[in-house]
């Protein structure tokens, strides 16, 4: 009887605890299980999204090879609308901008690049878009607009390209001193093996070399 009494007391204690905390425990378990299920579903969704985006991106690449700018733009827009959170959307915007530029559709090119700057998820892609928009603005002789695209911070590995583009803008503005400084700064940030280094050096030489070289030549 002593054992039965002890057992009954334990059972009574358990019932009391469950009455007080049972709902809390139940809801905690439900929330935990729901969170786990949501996480699993999200991973499944993400994998599915990535797979579909990859297929659409491949189709767009085929259109690029075929030089069908209309299909390229359509595919890029589909990727942005349906899979905007994936890296494929950002990559497609850059490719579509280049396709549109080659087709002399500057409006579409600028729209693709601006979307990437405003809505893209990758900072480096955004930086590239700004540099390319600056190039289009330069072609349109919108020099202030071009320089505004190049304001602010850029990733270290793109700073030489930013300086090179600034040099081009300064040349167009007949600001030769500013162009020399920009080109020289771009060269200073490049390694000897950089394929763009020789091109920037040619630009610098064409306007009389660096400021130091100009002084020495006198």
Image (spheres, rainbow, N blue to C red):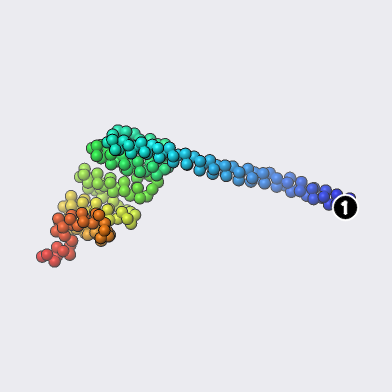
Along the line of sight, which residue is nearer the eye, 173 or 69? 69
Name the residue located 50 percent from the left edge and 43 percent from the top edge. 43
Q: Quadrant of residue 34?
A: top right
Q: Residue at x 28, y 39 (%)?
A: 99
Q: Quadrant of residue 109?
A: top left
* Position in image of residue 117 (x %, y %): 34, 45
Instruction: Find disc 1 in the rendering and name its residue.
Output: 2
- In the rendered image of this protein, does residue 188 appear above or below residue 117? below
Horizontal arrangement in the rendering, residue 105 relative to residue 11 (left or right) = left
**Secondary structure under badge 1?**
helix
**Above or below: residue 180 compared with residue 85:** below
Classify 10 Å Cα crowding around label 1: few (below 14), some (14-19), many (20 and above): few
Question: What percent of the width, then of the height, locates residue 54?
Answer: 40, 40
Whether residue 107 appears in this view of the structure is: no
Residue 6 % position (x, y) = 83, 52
Nearer to us in this view, 26 or 39: 39
Query: Residue 10 location in percent, x, y?
Result: 80, 50
């Amino acid at each position: 009887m002593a054992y039965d009494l002890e057992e009954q007391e334990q059972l009574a204690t358990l019932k009391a605890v469950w009455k007080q905390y049972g709902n809390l425990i139940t809801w905690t378990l439900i929330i935990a299980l729901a969170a786990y299920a949501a996480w699993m579903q999200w991973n499944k969704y993400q994998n599915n999204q990535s797979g579909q985006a990859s297929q659409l991106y491949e189709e767009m690449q085929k259109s690029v090879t075929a030089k069908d700018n209309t299909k390229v733009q359509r595919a890029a827009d589909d990727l942005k609308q349906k899979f905007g959170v994936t890296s494929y959307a950002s990559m497609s915007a850059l490719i579509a901008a280049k396709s549109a530029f080659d087709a002399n559709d500057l409006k579409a090119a600028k729209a693709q690049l601006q979307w990437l700057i405003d809505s893209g998820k990758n900072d480096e892609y955004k930086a590239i878009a700004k540099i390319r928009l600056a190039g289009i603005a330069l072609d349109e002789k919108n020099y202030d607009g071009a320089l505004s695209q190049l304001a602010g911070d850029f990733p270290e590995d793109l700073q030489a390209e930013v300086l090179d583009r600034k040099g081009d803008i300064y040349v167009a503005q007949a600001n030769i001193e500013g162009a020399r400084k920009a080109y020289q700064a771009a060269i200073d940030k490049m390694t000897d093996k950089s394929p763009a280094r020789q091109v920037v050096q040619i630009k610098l030489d064409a306007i009389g070399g660096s400021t130091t070289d100009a002084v020495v030549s006198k």
